[in-house]
Amino acid sequence: MEFLNVALPKGRLGEKVYAMFEKAGFECPSIKENNRKLIFENEERMVRYFWVKPSDVAIYVERGAADIGVAGKDILLEYEPDIYELLDLNIGKCRMAVAAPKGFKDNKKKTLKVATKFSNIAKDYYTKMGRDIDIIHLNGSIEIAPILGLSDVIVDIVETGTTLKENNLEVIETIVPISARFIANKTSFKFKGEQIEKLVNELSNQIEVEND
Amino acid sequence: MYIDDSVLNNDEKIIFNLRSIYSNAGYSQFKMSKFEEYDMYVANKDFLISDNIITFTDTNGKLMALKPDVTLSIIKGFKEKEGFVQKLYYNENVYRISKGTNAFKEIMQVGLECIGDIKEEDIAQVLLLAAKSLKSISKKAVLDISNVSLIAEVLDKVDSSIKTEILKCIGEKNTFELQKVCKENNVDENTASLLKSLVSLYGKPSKVIPQLKELFTSDNAKQAIAQFESIALLFEKENLGDMLNIDFSVVNTIKYYNGIVFKGFIESVPNGVLSGGQYDKLLQKLGKKAKAIGFAVYLDQLEDIDVIGGNN
């Protein structure tokens, strides 16, 4: 059997995901040691974990550097990787939404200026509605754009809405609900199918128990 | 002439291996022009993987394109005759957009097309050649087969506005999203469960075929399943049984493909390296009654792998 390479998203979500994988019988104790290592292996379980930037997980998996990984649906919608999306892990839940300053009225006579990190999602959404938009791609602190008059609205992930509220913004439309997804490289699924399927089954049992 | 094969790159070795496999199987080489009239691609743009085509104006003012695809160029010139089957292979560059850089890229393709009054044996031979092509590249290879007419039959029962979305779910093996789409659009339970089984049923033919027989009972489905059975049998006979999988996540454009479709994978290459299927519908659209099946091997990803060499 060969090592199963797992790309985990750095941060709180990744830790939750690892806990699920551990419970599914794919534990790797060394990952909990407090050091600066990047890659963690457990030869007993033939599993190898590594932490990567959450938005990069899909790339690692699509290109086969990782066999499997966990990525937010937002990243999958934005980047559209050629992978299998095998499970909704039901964690890291939030939504992709359009937000604007309180009391905002869309002037349909004008091009709508949209600031976002998710250009593809925003473009798709407004194309479907037939609305002419100008996309302003930003890499962070999106909320500040409408306040400074850089954009009319923003398209971004909304978890609790606190940041929006504190900046006098509100959600005007939900585009799509987001959660963490278990993804697999297509080739890996052919050649390491047994290991991946075992993990998928264990994880889906965990998800069902939680939902009950 | 003696050629020292140590000077050959991996992809070049693969090309020579494949060419000898196809020519030993009775296929003859088809050499085509680098350019085609742009009109042909516009008329059949759904058949192409991407809409992006490099165009330029010819010396006499005609709008031309650098080939994004070889199949169209081959079938365009096909003359129908009863009982006639044309077997061709090619080794050509195509020009497509590469996802990462969003710029045009030259991709070397080797492939074959079998066009005309083709019978089950011809289809079986094409599948075997696909399998042998993969084996000549790597010992660890898998050929996934699917049947679009079986998928299309179930899809016919859902509203056309969600077909693309459902196909995408099947292609991603995304059971969760599939169920959600079905529920939101009031797809009846029977259809929804059939769609779900198309996602969850995959693997060795011996495991999948009995379950397919229980679930799909129409004449059309029976035909598709019988074809799976005879192909599985043939692969067993040729000692290639290990590499054959039934997997409906191979979803090529339903508009042009009609029967069997397939995709080949080899270990250490992250994406499929071979893709093909039966595309009678494309010929129909071009006003021809003939049937056709073919596949292409994408060589752009194969530079790094170790070729096992030989075609025996």
Image (tube, coloured by chain):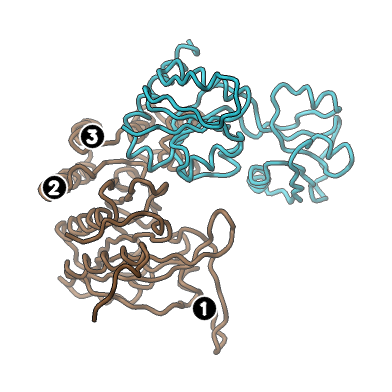
Mark 2 vs 3, N-terminal side = 3
| Residue marked by disc 2 | B239
* As drawn, A163 above or below B62: above
Q: Which mark is residue B52?
A: none
Which amino acid type is marked by label 2? Answer: Asn
**Disc 3 from disc 1: Cα separation:** 46 Å
Q: Colour of chain A?
A: cyan
Total number of numbered discs in the rendering: 3
Please give the name of the residue rendered at 41% of the width and 56% of the height, measured from the top-left corner.
Answer: B304
| Residue marked by disc 3 | B208
* Residue at the left extreme, as displayed: B237
Q: Position of residue B36 (x, y in %)?
A: 45, 77
Q: Position of residue A94 (x, y in %)?
A: 64, 25
Q: Position of residue B256 (x, y in %)?
A: 37, 57
Label 1 crowding class (10 Å Cα cut-off): few <14, some 14-19, many 20+? Answer: some
**Residue B29 appears in the figure:** yes
Q: Nearer the viewer, residue A36 or B303?
A: A36
| Residue marked by disc 1 | B64
Q: Quadrant of the C terminus of chain B?
A: bottom left
Q: Colour of chain B?
A: brown
Mark 2 vs 1, N-terminal side = 1
